Amino acid sequence: MSRLWALLVFGILTGCMLLLSTHWMVSSEIRQEMLLHAQRQHALVQDTIRRFKSSQESLIGALTQHSAVKNFASAEDDANELLLHTTHAHQSIMQLRVLDTDGHERYRVDRSLTGTVKLVPQEELQSKSHRYYTRSFMTLEKGEIGYSQFDLNMEHGKLEQPFNPTLRIGTPIIREDRVVGYLVINYYMEGWDDYFGSFADTDVFIVDQDDHFLHHPEGEWAWSGYSEPPRTAGQYFKGLNAGDVLQGRDAVSWIDDSTIALPLDLFGQSVLALYRQRTPVDSLVFEKLYQFGGISLVALLLVMVPAGRLIYVGFRQVQEERDKEQEQAYFIQQVFENTFDGLVVLSPQGTIVRANRAVSEVFGYSCEELLRQNINELVALPHRMQRDAGLNGFLAHSRSLAGEDREVEGFHADGSTLPVSIAFTQVSIGRAPHFIGTIRDLSLIRSLEQEARQKESMMTHQAKLAALGEMLVAIAHQWRQPLHGIGLIVQDVVLAHEKDRLTPDYLHEAQDEVMGQLEYLSDTIDEFRRFFGDEGRVQSCNLAGVVAQIQRLFSPQLKAHSLGLAYRLASDAACSKEVELTDLVRLDELTITNRPAEIKQLLLNLIANAREAIEQLERPAASQQVITIEFSASGSHVFISVMDRAGGVDTDLASRMFEPYVTSKRNGTGLGLFIARALAERRLNGELSYTRLKADESQPHSGSCFTLSLPRLLETPFEGGTS
């Protein structure tokens, strides 16, 4: 009975976990869909603003070039007629005025809220020099167009009632290269409130930098900065501060589970556009879950009814035969548009005939803008030709790149440059040769490579500090005996003094012994300073001599742990013999030209690893308390192996031991062997490998063997990494 209860509890917990996992996945998918939907709506808003600015800038530019406007001081009738005609023709214009250089109105045409257009008499004209936007327009240079803030209209120092959202566009009037006045157009912007509220499934909020609503779906919150007292967006969306969001680096900010904030350039005014899904997220989640349940039910029914499956397959076969050509064209279109790499089709003259979305994203141009450009305007090809080089020039130039993937410099629409790779393939379309270009943005790859180099440099520095730590421990062992000897000498002198046996000869003898011990301590310090003194320097060195320097500092520490070093010289692959290190130092075949400081650091790491492996054994045998260093040489390389018989490394771990953060030690970092191999390959131009030593009749214990292979001559400094 208890097993049944346990099975029931397990089933309930598993079901809950599955339900929660499904809920989380569906919620994540919905949030992603909401973000993409908001970004599409945001792009539509930005495009609408851009098209409005483009059309109105064309209008005001055309008006300032008209002779009646340039000569408004003398052509009064023509100017009045032009302004009236323009205001009648454009229903969104609320006021159209001409100001002199002091900001006084010379002409003004008004449109009332009922649509009536009239020319304002001269006696009713006003001075606008005190208005902030007039002062801004009066700083514009020739050809510049300025925008006021998107705000409410003021008449005679008071807000117009009901609220009248207004935008003003101004530009200087130039005659004979001299500013003679300013043309200012006031636009009714109430239609923009209707536009922001026209999205079927989304509420749109516009918040300025002062955290006030410019647009709000609820009328009482609209233009909240003008209410008494002013109300902020932070009061509606708890914790929201539009200024902080706009100053942040994130392009997208989630305000709550249903609201997304995106920065918006509203006619030169930096504002925050908020998009809130009208349907609650939980409702969308449950709707998705219902859909998932329905699909699962349909799939189950299809499995249970084979006949229906057969009918479906037969229908699909007939349909595929009928629509084969259309589907093939659609497939090619989808592959072209949705491939990760940018694809362009070039004419024989190098003009872009077709481009997919990936190219648009790489260079920042729309697909329509790309069709008017030459490939040389986007990338700096080798031996760059002029745009009008003609058919033969581009053919010869592109054939030299055909089949090659080259890294070149690309030119973004915002004026910046970026690394890209490009490759051309020649094809025939009709009777004319064309080229298909494959373009890939390498910016992220280069950034990741730079980050990897920085991390590797930091880890190499950590390894150097670890090696220095090993050396400090070795020096501590070196110093213990002479310091103990000095202490005994001092005690002996004091005792001789107390017994009245302290003679001058006795004192001089004690002095000589103390000085001898101090000289030994000084020699140890000098040896430590020389150990890494030639860091990074390429010079001739004997590998046995390098090991001798390590032994002098490291052997006391090994002896303290009852460990020893043994040396072997391998004459061939099957034979090696034990030798004295002093004999090896005299062998020319072990002399190489490389970086001895980095070699010491690497070997010290391997010896320390062997020592730690032996120390982890509970009762090591005598043969396991020896670290063997074997030397061998070939025509072009010299090999040095560090071996121990501490049991070796597991097979699973051995295949990954040179990867970062892989370790068998309880408190290990997993960086030692990774950095050791990086030093061998990038600084020493060598190789570091691992071999598991098997137990045999002569040696009953298995172990590890790390072999460092080094070239005899490092001709030039190898710049693969840093030490």
Image (spheres, rainbow, N blue to C red):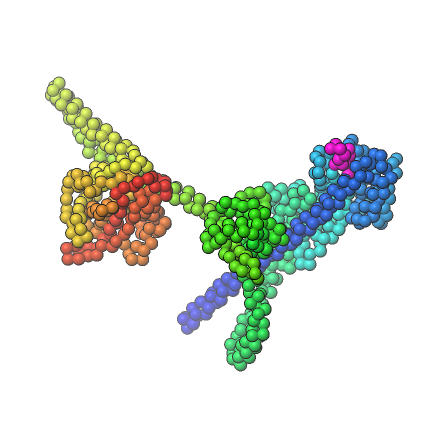
The answer to whether one can see residue 586 in this image is yes
Q: Residue at x 64, y 54 (%)?
A: 41
Q: Residue furthest bottom?
A: 307
Between 544 and 22, the residue placed more toward the observer is 544
In this picture, residue 713 sits left or right of residue 423: left
Between 226 and 384, the residue placed more toward the observer is 384
Q: Residue at x 69, y 51 (%)?
A: 48
State the image coordinates of residue 125 (x, y, percent, origin top left): 85, 36
State the image coordinates of residue 540 (x, y, percent, origin top left): 25, 37
The answer to whether one can see residue 275 in this image is no
Q: Residue at x 49, y 53 (%)?
A: 399
Q: Is residue 487 above or below residue 213?
A: above
Q: Quadrant of residue 561?
A: top left
Between 581 and 30, the residue placed more toward the observer is 581
Q: Quadrant of residue 180?
A: top right
State which quarter of the image contains the N terminus.
bottom left
The answer to whether residue 178 is magenta is yes
In this picture, residue 29 sits left or right of residue 682: right
Q: Residue furthest top?
A: 504
Q: Quadrant of residue 331?
A: bottom right
Magenta stretch, overall SS = strand
Q: Residue at x 20, y 47 (%)?
A: 632
Q: Residue furthest front?
A: 392
State the image coordinates of residue 718 (x, y, percent, origin top left): 34, 41
Instruction: Give the magenta part as a residue range.
Output: 172-184
In this picture, residue 565 sits left or right of residue 150: left
State the image coordinates of residue 83 (x, y, percent, origin top left): 82, 43
